[in-house]
Amino acid sequence: ESSGCLGPLAGNDIKELITTILNRINYKSTQLEVDLLYDIFEEKIDKKWRNPLFMQLYIITWLKNDNNCDISQEEAYEWVLDREQLRWKEIIKRNIQNSNNYDLDGILDDWKELLCFNVATDCNISITNIGIMPDYIKDIYNRIGTCVAGIRKDSDYEKKVNHFIEDMIGGESNNIAMSNIWPDPILGYLFLKYANRDADSLKCFVDACIDTEVVHFQSFVKKLEMDFPKNEFVGRLWSYYGMRITPEKLLQGVVNTSLRTFPKPLTAREEHPDRT
């Protein structure tokens, strides 16, 4: 799995992890509370969600909600993303060049759209590769860049943009893909929460994903359908994908993926540098 999180846990492993999580957040738990949380996981939480990260998020949400036992996976993710959104707003406020000239909510919406593209294609968000992205994504990226770093001619433009992205995601700018930060279920929920529902924007977004990384985008939407089978937006996404995809685009996407995945063959000079 691209998320890198551990697989499902069971039995005593869950109880030990519950105790460890509670200890790390300095919560003085009783064995009764540990057993209660264990029973909740056994009774209410699907096995595919029983990984350490989700359990930590769930337990923290449980505590924040006065030990309410009726918290769903979605409620736990909602709490996490609400917290992230507050953090994003603070970072934007710190970094924008002139708060009077920019719409903070507009910048935040642009960031969410860029983040959704990153999640749907697993393509790094970096100033070094924005030049090869579709125009729709370039425009969003450039609006954010202008807000936080001024004009491209400024000598420290690239440094400011990279610093901003690192702050927003929490990773190094040369390897920023959300799949390196959070596990798939949270990424899927993030996408469904923040994806632009506007019909024209959605068409442009799907086109950009197909043109950039059609193979990953296709598997991403399939996984959304598995993890969130009752979500109506997933159906819309499939519909737009079906309307925009062509055999030629699919073939080109496979070629593009192969070129990015496999290293370029060495030339004779590179393979045998000692030969003239």
Image: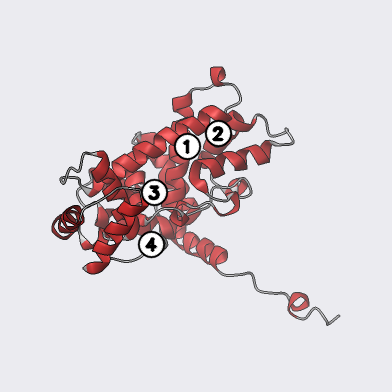
Q: Quadrant of residue 259?
A: bottom right
Could you say whether the residue bearing mark 1 is in a helix, strand or loop?
helix
User: Dot 2 corresponds to which residue?
Assistant: 144
- Mark 1 → mark 3, Cα distance in angstroms: 24 Å
Name the front one of labels 1 and 4: 4
Q: Position of residue 80 (x, y in %)?
A: 34, 42
Image quadrant holding the C terminus, namely bottom right
1 and 2 marks in contact (CB < 8 Å)? yes
Q: Earlier in the sequence, mark 2 or mark 4?
A: 4
Dot 2 amino acid type:
Ile
Name the front one of labels 2 and 4: 4
Which numbered circle lies on residue 244?
3
Name the front one of labels 3 and 4: 4
Dot 3 amino acid type:
Arg
Q: Earlier in the sequence, mark 1 or mark 3?
A: 1
Q: Earlier in the sequence, mark 1 or mark 2?
A: 1
Which numbered circle lies on residue 5?
4
- Disc 1 crowd, CA 10 A, few/some/many (<14, 14-19, 20+): many
Q: Residue at x 40, y 55 (%)?
A: 217
Q: Position of residue 55 (x, y in %)?
A: 29, 55
User: Dot 1 corresponds to which residue?
Assistant: 111
